[in-house]
Image (cartoon, helix red, strand yellow):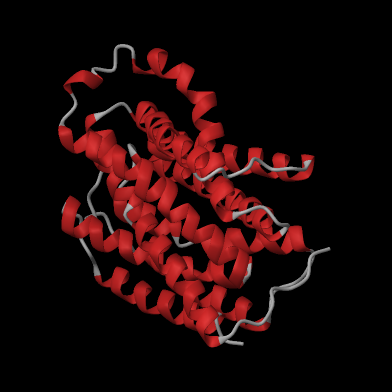
Amino acid sequence: MSQPPQVLSTRARAAVYAAATVSVFAWGATPIATKIGVNHIDPILVGVARTVIGGAVALPIVLLMRIPLPRTARQFRLLALSAFCGFLAFTILFSIGQNRTSGTHTGLIFASIPIFTGIFAFLIERRGPSVFWWVGGAVALAGEAYIILFRGADDGGGATLAGDAIVLVATIIVCLGYVIGARLTQIGYSTWGTTFWGVVLAALVQAPLVPFIAADTGWQNADAAGWWAVLYLALGSGIVSYVCWYWALGKGGIAKTGMVYFYSPLVTIGLAVILLGETVTPPVLGAAVAIFAGVYISQRD
């Protein structure tokens, strides 16, 4: 049974939330980059290519920095599970789902990330959440429920129920990967190793499949915008965000720091409006207020 996260100094707490904020903004842009990518390139190829490219960048880094692989069987199992969840199952499923839904809908689904992260954390750590976590989570989820129930039909983006369902499954899987990765850093393995070796292992598994997946997809004719989106997904979303997030979760506590992710859907919705031309309705603004209030309450000691 693990111990609750240690009490942080003001400076350490600021560093934790700064790292979490970088990750949140990087991940908030992920649905938009994915939407742009799948508009030009086959969705499965987008999901695989982002990991393979990320692995190609990460491999020389781990070799030059001499980042070791896990030394114990337990650490290696956690690394393999984290890699599978975050860099294989999530990336493929999310690309498929995002092809069938809108950036706004995905932003709303992403609002559930702190809840699923917290649930997995409490199950693994065998401890219950605080009253503030319950209250903050309930308020934030109320905001999400409000916007889902009253979102209207004019938000655009070609959202479908199947797309929303696939994105939700992908979101639950990546939350499990977050918690496993954070646990790995908490038992002594480095954040750098968790991220870089994770993406390398996932890339090694998927790289041999690229020629078969890419066949007959017309990837040669894809717009530059599609490949720039894949590059962002590989580096910004796939590496930088994971380093920041695992470090923040490991230092600040999985469930408590995970609540900061309630800000991610607001980033996604804002970018969906600016870059994809989707519509912000009054329910979106009302839900935003509830989400921010929920995050504030959940972070109270």
For the image, the number of numbered tags is: 0
- Give the camera-side residue of 148 and 206: 206
- For the C terminus, the quadrant is bottom right
Q: Position of residue 189 (x, y in %)?
A: 67, 52
Q: Position of residue 225 (x, y in %)?
A: 18, 38
- Give the camera-side residue of 189 and 287: 189
State the residue at coordinates (30%, 51%).
103
Rendered view: 255 above or below 273: below
State the residue at coordinates (45%, 36%).
60
State the residue at coordinates (58%, 64%).
249
Task: Examine the rendering and report whether any part of residue 149 can be seen.
Answer: no
Q: In which quarter of the image is residue 274?
A: bottom left
- For the N terminus, the quadrant is bottom right
State the residue at coordinates (53%, 47%).
195
Q: In which quarter of the image is residue 77?
A: top right
Rendered view: 284 above or below 31: below
Rendered view: 181 above or below 10: above
Task: Examine the rendering and report whether any part of residue 99 can be seen.
Answer: yes
Q: Position of residue 18 (x, y in %)?
A: 43, 72
Q: Position of residue 165 (x, y in %)?
A: 47, 43
Q: Which residue lies furthest to the right in this view?
A: 1
Is 36 left or right of 115, judged from the image as shown? Answer: left
